[in-house]
Amino acid sequence: GLLTQMNVEMLCTTEDPTDTLEHHKQLAASSFSTKVSTAFRPDKTVLIDNEGYNSYIEQLEKASGLAINTFTDLKDALLKRLDFFHENGCRISDLGFNQLPFEDFTDAEVNAIFEKRRKGSDISVLEADKFKTALLLFLCEEYASRGWVQQFHLGALRNNNSRMHRILGPDTGWDSIGDYSQATTLSKFLDALDSKDKLAKTILYNLNPADNELFAAMAGNFNDGSHKGKVQYGSGWWFLDQKDGIIKQLNALSNMGLLSTFVGMLTDSRSFLSFPRHEYFRRVLCNLLGQEMANGELPQDTAWVGSMVADICYHNAKQYFEL
C-alpha cells in the first residue's frame, strides 16, 4: 500500500492507558512491513477536575485489574499499564495541556485531594494543580526509568463554542490558540525532574507562536550532553504546521538552539491523509536553507548542508527514538 510505497519504516499512534492495544498486537503479529507503535497518552488520568473523572477511573480499574481508592492505588494501576504498554513496544508518551502545572505538594495533601474527588466532591483550582503536579512528576520519572521519550503539547484553548460543544462534544473543531503563561511552570517542572536525574528525552511543542523563542530557549536549559538533542523544541504543531509557522519554528530553533540536532516533522497519525506533512516540511526546510546559501548566510557546501537536511528529516529521529 501507500505506506510501503513511501518507505515508511514506523508510525506511532496515541492511546489512552485503558486501551487494549488489540490492533497493535495484530499488526505486530502480521507480515506488515511498517512498524506500528503506540504513545502513552494519560491526559484523562491527570485531569482530576474534568467532568466524568470518576467514571474514567472506573475504566482504569477494569483495565488494570486493581481497585483505585487512594493515590497510591492510582499509581499502582498506572504502573501496570505502563508495563503493559512497554511490553507492547511503546517507547513514547504524549500529553496535551494548556500549560504544565507546578505547585508544591505533600503526599498527604495529594492523597486527601484524590480521595475527596473520588467521593464526588468538588476541588479547588489549587488542589487540582497540586494533584496534577504530583501525578505528572510520577509519570515522567517512570518514563525516564524506562528510557522513553516524553512529549508536551502546550497552549490550546479548547471548547470555545459552548453551543457546538454541547451538540458535537470535544475535539470536533472548536479549539484555538491560547495565551497562557508558560515559562515559569515549565521551567520549574523540567527542573524538578532534572534535579533528580529523572528528566527523560523531551520534546516541547507550543501552539501560540508568541512562545516560539521561549520554548526554543527553554529546551537549551536542560540539554546535558547525555543524548544528542535530549530536550527538543518540537516542530510547528496544529495551527502552526503550515509554511509560515514551519519557517518561524525553524528560525527560532536556529537562533536559540542547534538546528542540526532537530528530529524534524511529525504528523497526526490518527489522520492517514496528514502524512504528506513530511514532504511539505522537507520542501520548506530545503527552500529555507537554499535561500540562506544563496544569500551567503550559509556556506556554499551542498554536501554539508544536504547531510544536515538528511539528519533532520531521517537520521536524527531514528537515533533519538532508537528505531
Image (cartoon, grey):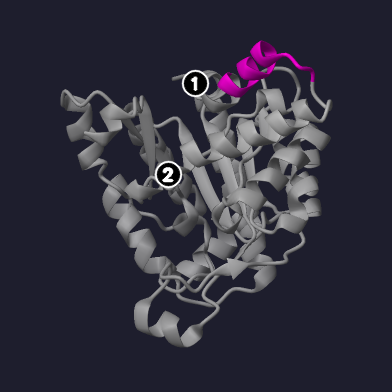
| Residue at image point 42% right, 44% down | 78
Instruction: Give residue 242's position: percent from left, percent from top.
Output: 58, 52
Instruction: Give residue 191's position: percent from left, percent from top.
Output: 76, 38
- Which numbered marker is on residue 318? 1
| Residue at image point 36% right, 78% down | 168
Above-or-below relation of 95 to 21:
below
**Quarter the C terminus occupies:** top left
User: In the rendered image, which quarter is residue 100 located in?
Assistant: bottom right
**Quarter the N terminus occupies:** top left
In the structure shown, which secondary structural element does the residue marked by tag 1 occupy? helix
- Which numbered marker is on residue 2? none
Q: Main secondary structure of the magenta part?
A: helix
- Which numbered marker is on residue 78? 2
User: In the rendered image, which quarter is residue 44 located in?
Assistant: bottom left
Task: Give the magenta part as a residue range.
Answer: 299-310
| Residue at image point 26% right, 35% down | 2
User: In the rendered image, which quarter is residue 230 located in?
Assistant: top right
Residue 182 among magenta residues: no
Depth check, front residue: 213 or 184 = 213
Q: What amino acid is found at the position of numbered circle 1 in the picture?
A: Lys
Nearer-N-terminus badge (1/2): 2
| Residue at image point 42% right, 71% down | 170
Q: Can residue 162 be seen in this view?
A: yes
Depth check, front residue: 293 or 210 = 293
